[in-house]
Image: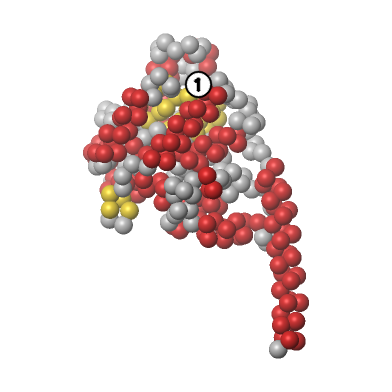
Amino acid sequence: MKRFLKNITVFILPVILFFSINFLINYSIFNTQEPNIKDVDVLIIGDSHPHRAINPSFWKNAENIAMSAEPLIISYWKLKKVLKIITPDTVIIGLAPHNISQLNDFRFIDNRFASEMFRRYYPIQNFNSIKKDIPVDFQTFYLTLWKETAFYPKKNHIHYMGRYSNKKISNVSDWKIALRNHYVKDYKEMGVSKICISYLDSILNLCHQNNIQPILVGSPVHSKYYQGIPQPILKKYYNIVDSYKDRAIIFSRTNDMSYPDSLFYNADHLNQFGSNRFMNEFIGFLNTSGTTNPMSEVYPEKKLK
């Protein structure tokens, strides 16, 4: 028996050492690695709504780093990381009713969502700061971290930087699916996420601390999707929009029903044509908003067909 245990130990120790060395190397890399981002005037953050709706080419110097399904909690961590490298004049934050849905909390709990969230954001995560409010699935997190760091040294650990992307196609038939994905868990309608609202507040505070102008932007959604948004969430969303008017520029077009089906990629995202129209309206709003920013310089008019 002793000989067996000795043989097992002789076999296991090199394996453990191999994994440990790779982890330490990768930890050193991702702990010091900075995202490749140029110094810009306008920075766009958020989830798939600004990812598809807000085209950075409408400005002289802008970048869109939004990613699909990104909760406001992570957008805050990402912004903190990026602001160590650059200081833009303006940060545009995507804000729609689904961003304050409690279903966002489950992106750190439910393995269907959590494994992807952990894979993207392990270099910038601070899950200990939210574990009192959200029972983070740490078992899945550490398993994901092991998969990403234990096998071989990786040059690049930055998977959290998005970009603007869109298509010309249109199919709005998925409005029921989109509503379930944003507001329903186990056949139960979710409520408002207090922690998401708290982190939205933190994003605005971070902007003001760095003398950055925050702009909250909500792009249009299809009428069938909009009509299905739970009323408590919709009411809270408009309360937030109203209460933040003194802290940010607000451009909320979530309930704009003038967009035809042909301008939507699907029920809750604009396609390329819809994005072009939305951007022209957004730029026009900024140029006539009367803020202290030099809008004619930072937000030049641009028309795309």
Secondary structure of the residue carrying numbered label 1: strand
The answer to whether residue 37 is seen in the rendering is yes
Taking the spot 51% from the left edge, 36% from the top edge, the residue there is 76
Residue 270 appears at what percent x and percent y?
37, 35
Q: 175 left or right of 113?
A: left
Under mark 1, the amino acid is: Gln
Category of crowding for the residue at label 1, using alpha-carbon neighbours closer than 10 angstroms: few (below 14), some (14–19), many (at least 20): some
Q: 30 left or right of 55?
A: right
Residue 140 appears at what percent x and percent y?
52, 59
Q: Quadrant of the N terminus?
A: bottom right
Residue 113 appears at what percent x and percent y?
45, 53
Q: Quadrant of the C terminus?
A: top left
Q: Quadrant of residue 100?
A: top left
Q: 290 left or right of 127?
A: left
Taking the spot 48% from the left edge, 24% from the top edge, the residue there is 214
The answer to whether residue 163 is seen in the rendering is no
Taking the spot 70% from the left edge, 63% from the top edge, the residue there is 19
Taking the spot 52% from the left edge, 57% from the top edge, the residue there is 138
Where does label 1 land, which residue? Answer: 213
